[in-house]
Image (cartoon, rainbow, N blue to C red):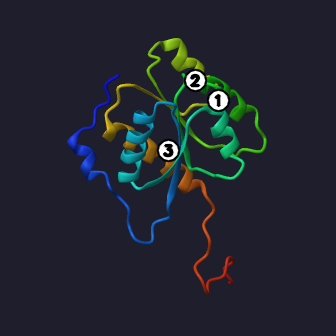
Amino acid sequence: MKIVFDESSRSLEQKTKGAEQQYALVVEDDPDTNQLINIVLTMGGFEVYPAWNGLEAMRSLSSLHPDVIVLDLMMPRMDGWAVLEQLRASKMVPNIPVIVLTAVYDADSQRRARTLGAKDYVNKPFASADLVSRVQALAAFVLAAKPTKPAPGTSVHESS
């Protein structure tokens, strides 16, 4: 498998002071790919939590609350399809956007993943800049949907 790590990824680091930290759960059984995704997303401003199979990912969701999940489909113990099905059926796990990142290229798999709730589908090999921009876009959507806290000393209700 070839994974493209392009030079434009070096400019992806976007951590800024005062910005809310965003979290990504990366579910990938291949250690090299998991590490590469971790590096690329960290450079893109994310704190990354790795999981090595679907079962580990589902267990970790009881304590982690990621802004986005990057999910491989072909894994041991519990594959990505089962994870998508459990996320869709779960009432305890919040609606976390999922990006499928896989070597499965066919249109039926893409359709099935989206039907099961995946928000995006990226084929391996992937360009690191493309993956980061897609993850950032979904995480930004999640961040925009979070309720904001009023600034200290301000009232939630305006008086007339």
Q: Above or below — where is 135 with respect to 103?
A: below
Q: Name the front one of labels 3 and 1.
A: 1
Count of numbered circles on the image: 3
Residue with the mark numbered 3: 138
Disc 3 packing (10 Å; few <14; some 14–19; many ≥20): many
Q: For this view, does 65 lie left or right of residue 99?
A: right
Residue reaching furthest to the right: 91
Where's residue 97, x and y in %?
58, 40
Residue reaching furthest to the front: 31
- Per the model, the C-alpha gap separating discs 2 and 3 is 16 Å
Q: For this view, does 7 lie left or right of residue 41?
A: left
Amino acid type of disc 3? Answer: Leu
Where's residue 66, x and y in %?
59, 50
Residue with the mark numbered 1: 84
Q: Above or below — where is 129 with respect to 103?
A: below
Q: Secondary structure at mark 3?
A: helix
Please tell me in which quadrant of the rendered image residue 75 appears.
top right
Q: Secondary structure at mark 1?
A: helix
Residue with the mark numbered 2: 113
Amino acid type of disc 1? Answer: Leu
Amino acid type of disc 2? Answer: Ala
- Per the model, the C-alpha gap separating discs 3 and 1 is 17 Å
Mark nearer the N terminus (1 vs 2): 1
- Per the model, the C-alpha gap separating discs 1 and 2 is 8 Å
Q: Residue at image x 39%, y 25%? A: 124
Q: State which quarter of the image contains the C terminus.
A: bottom right
Q: Above or below — where is 17 with respect to 129?
A: below
Mark nearer the N terminus (2 vs 3): 2
User: Is the residue under label 2 in contact with that under label 1 (CB below 8 Å)?
Assistant: yes
Disc 1 packing (10 Å; few <14; some 14–19; many ≥20): many
